[in-house]
Amino acid sequence: MGGGQRRLPGPASRSRALTELSVLHQTGILAHMRAADVSESRDLTAYRGEFPIFRDSVYLNTCSLGALSDRSRREVNAYLDIWDACGASAWYDVWWDALAGLRAGYAAVVNASPTEIALHASVSSATAVLAGLLDYTARPKVVTTNLDFPTVPYQWLAKQAAGVEVVVVESPDGVTVPIEMIADAVDERTALVATSHVYFTTGAIQDIAALAEVAHRRGALCFVDAYQSVGQLPVDVRALGVDALCAGGLKWLLGGPGIVFLYVRSELISTLTPSVTGWFANARQFAFDASHIEWHADARRFELGTPALAAVYAQRGGLEIVLEIGTGHLRDATANLTEDLIARALGAGLTLTTAARPQERSGIVMVRHPDPGAAVEKLRDAGIIVDARPGHVRLSPFFYNVPDDYAAAIEILAT
């Protein structure tokens, strides 16, 4: 994407690029799709055949990495074909629109506007930009919890030498954190409440709307790490009332690593000036003016450098499936599998770390185990892919799983 004279491909190669562009505009993510109607349950097992990993394995690890779909593989192959045919000129014909389409797709899945979406390579880079947007002079405090993924507190722990105070609210039961405890930590000196929608440690779902209200009551902002929720749960940023939210392709959006999004509420965008930035944040980036930045008027002002296009295309395939099914249907299917898994595990004598009520449980089931690493290896030898976390074996069913998947895992864990 550097400077220099623009060279266009020959007619045949250019035709292929334009054909791909036409296909792009016909995909669901550029049609401003909203989640499908959730008024009735649907049998989603037909989608299982789109995920080749199930031909040879039992996959119960979506909360670490979503399974690769045939659609994502086709999208990545299409990207490689365009790169091969057009080289850098693909930016002019196809890839710029692919980025716009992905912003629109992410916006659709969380009920945002595409102008409120910034693309990033990881939650770490997105939260680094977010952490650099705030003025901590009068409000030096950031409130988080000990159940959040470390990426969230790390961004502000790294700023302690500059006077930022990080308050980590400790869970009383190791499962969740009562809203009242977080509210007690928030005061007029608080800049931000930064926490998760779904705790990666337990699968418990937080009442984010209530947390946003707690933050706003004290004049603070609310940022939500929704990496473990968007895709498996319906997420509506308008209804939740959050100021910023981050999620991405790695897990429940079935896009793999290397692509996430940062949502920033539209009313805030123009009031926030980045201190961590890159050339994609500049509205006049192709002026190549090293002496001046003219920020985008929308959330693109919070972007960094050139996105990884292979990840963008992989996410297009996964996001198409999510939007096609609808997050309401995905939630219904995953909740049914999760509750069945929990009942079978308890029936087999296993001990779980889980939220008390079904409506507070996501598709993450933590099975207590004295040697989780060894248990994961034993399951892998049996062709069952799960993950380990301290003191637990972690299973995460999604819509493409069937009860036989986790029944086999439970049988092995119970022996």
Image (cartoon, rainbow, N blue to C red):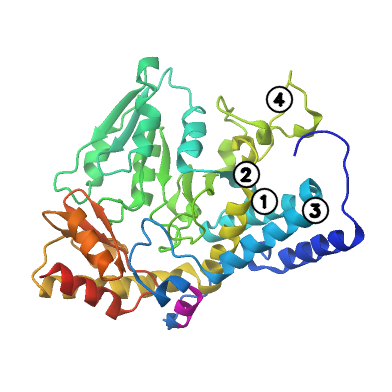
Residue at which label 1 appears: 99
Q: Is residue 32 visible?
A: no
Q: Is residue 50 magenta?
A: yes
Percent across and percent down for residue 8 are: 88, 49
- The residue sitting at 33% across, 43% down in the picture is 149
Query: Front-most of 333 and 178?
Result: 333
- The residue sitting at 40% across, 16% down in the picture is 162
Question: Of discs 2 and 1, which sits in the foreground?
Answer: 2
Quarter of the picture holding the N terminus: top right
Real-space Cα distance between discs 4 and 3?
Answer: 30 Å
Residue at which label 4 appears: 293
Percent across and percent down for residue 223 are: 42, 41
Q: Are marks 2 and 1 in contact (CB under 8 Å)?
A: yes
The label number, if any, that marks residue 86 in the structure image: 3
Residue 46 position (above or below residue 269): below
Residue 381, image quadrant: bottom left
Instruction: Describe residue 71's horizontal placement relative to residue 293 as left or right.
Output: left
Q: Amino acid at mark 2?
A: Pro
Residue at which label 2 appears: 307
Q: Is residue 249 magenta?
A: no
State the SS at label 1: helix
Residue 163 position (above or below residue 97): above
Real-space Cα distance between discs 4 and 2?
Answer: 19 Å
Mark 2 or 1, nearer chain start: 1
Mark 3 or 2, nearer chain start: 3
Mark 4 or 3, nearer chain start: 3
Residue 349 position (above or below residue 183): below
